[in-house]
Amino acid sequence: MPRRLLALLGLALALSLLPAAPAAASPRSDAKRLIALDDRLNGAVEAEGTATFERLMAEFEQCGPAEGELDRARSDEVFGRMLNLMMRNMFAAIRDDLAVAAGRLDRFAPATSAIRRASRAMASVVRLSVELGAEPPDLCTYFGAWKQAGWDPQWHPDPAVPGLTAQQRAGIRSAHATMRRSGRALRRYGISRKRVKALVSNYDARMLLELPAL
């Protein structure tokens, strides 16, 4: 057998033993990977988040105003601050998991531009949750001090609890708009309407814009 033919056969055999090149990323595969990141975060925080919510509700029943104790206006103020405190304390309970999730989203580098924008918007919301979960006020301590002040709607602790900055507020609105647009792309890439709706809702932080200052 000619040496050239032997060399070609040897090259062909060597090439056949090489691992196959990975398939090029597609919008559909990028979309599935994004959903998998969201599923992973949900799975990590579900149990702790539920337990924390139940604990905080029990604390509010113990430390908050009694039924009928306040008029409508002050009741609305107390309820709004309670939601603010509960969200911050829930973020604190799952803060480590949120930080890990933010890192994963930051490292996720999909080829599809719409998926890339969605992952960046998701990461921004998760990072905001990490920031808000940094040393939140204890619920019963907060309401105990407020009760001593007669539930005065002008009362706030000293030092004050930092509220959302203008940049954070703009970021919340921007992230929601991005997720809405990316949601339409995800539908085109094969993600179900129900799952897209859940994803957009998971990273809709606009409720934070409506909560009263602590």
Image: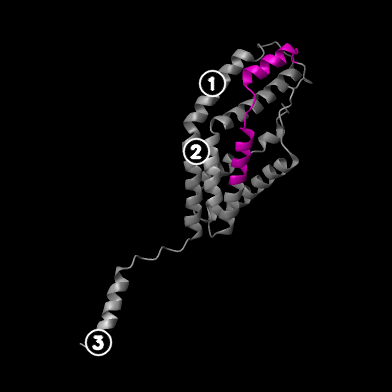
- What are the residue bounds of the magenta stretch? 123-151
Name the kind of residue labelled 1 in the image.
Arg
Residue 49: x %, y % from top left? 52, 30
- Residue visible at 66% across and 34% down in the picture: 207
> In this view of the protein, which residue sits in the foreground, 39 or 144?
144
Q: Quadrant of the N terminus?
A: bottom left
Residue 102: x %, y % from top left? 56, 44
Magenta: main secondary structure = helix
**Left or right, 155 with reference to 1:** right
Say if residue 204 shows up in the picture.
no
**Image mark for residue 3:** 3
Of all residues, the one furthest to the right in this rendering is 154
Residue on which the image places disc 2: 42
Q: Secondary structure at mark 3?
A: helix
- Residue visible at 65% across and 23% down in the picture: 82
- Of mark 2 and mark 1, the one earlier in the sequence is 2
Name the kind of residue labelled 3 in the image.
Arg
Residue on which the image places disc 1: 55
Give the Cα distance between marks 2 and 3: 61 Å
Name the kind of residue labelled 2 in the image.
Asn
Specify whether residue 29 is painted magenta.
no
> In this view of the protein, which residue sits in the foreground, 39 or 7?
7
